[in-house]
Amino acid sequence: MRRLARARRLRRVGRGLYVVIDQVRETPAVAIASALFGEVPHYVTTDAALAFHGLLDQPIGTITVVLSRTRRAIDIGPAIVRPVTVSADRLRAADAYATTADGFAVRLASREQAVVDAVAEPFWMEHGDLLAEVLAVFADDELERAAIGALARSTAAGQRLGYLLEEAGRQPPQLLAGLRPLRAVRLRPKDTRRGPYSTRWRVYG
């Protein structure tokens, strides 16, 4: 294996983990990320999932993979694979499915699940400032499912989704429209700057 790696036929991405370097067809980073955890329940979410669905066209520097147990981040070359954890029950309930990326197997969040994860766990998404643009092209039934998923996670997730829908010029689904939050939250908790404040959703943008 070391000889093949020196000959640039393999790329080492971790202890005992190698990616075949194909001069004709490069393995998509999202497929490598999914394959790293192929032996356990998992799914790829947020930026990488939304890019796969054609909703983002920015370079993806971090690929978020949801698991039920803690794993360390792995540098696969084109991106950093960042494992994040949820309960086993929540992982089973997630709207994710098996598909292929350029012929390589991948387990991926649906469009709605990727948005739910992004508003419930803002640290999981690199390009969170583009979520309003993503939601602008969602169908009404997709927004309904996203609202159900967000509120099942937390009131704060529902608040963030409502704020983003307002920013996208979309009417919130009826379930979300009835939300009357009592506490203010940040759209992106990492951002300590005080952005515009929505009195309706009690969100600092």
Image (cartoon, rainbow, N blue to C red):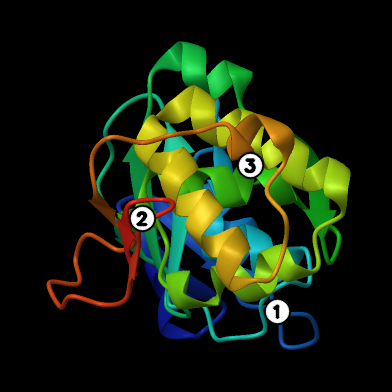
Describe residue 141's horizontal placement relative to residue 149 as left or right: right
Taking 78 as reference, is 45 above or below it? Answer: above
- Ranked by sequence position, the earlier of labels 2 and 1 is 1
Q: Earlier in the sequence, mark 2 or mark 3?
A: 3
When the figure is inspected, residue 157 is found, relative to residue 192, above or below; the finding is: above
Residue 60, percent from left and from top: 51, 77
Q: Count residues near mark 3 (Cα–Cα under 10 Å), then give few for <14, some for 14-19, many for 20+.
A: many
Looking at the picture, how far across and down is residue 69, in whole percent? 32, 26
- Nearer to the camera, 10 or 32: 32
Amino acid type shown at disc 2: Pro
Find disc 2 in the rendering and name its residue. Answer: 122
Q: Which residue is mark 1?
A: 26
Spatial separation of the CA atoms under disc 3 and disc 1: 27 Å
Task: Nearest to the eye among marks 2 and 1: give it.
Answer: 2
Q: Residue at x 70, y 79 (%)?
A: 26
Circle 3 sits on which residue? Answer: 113
The N terminus: image quadrant: bottom left
Q: Is residue 20 visible?
A: no
- Image spot of residue 38 (x, y percent): 58, 36
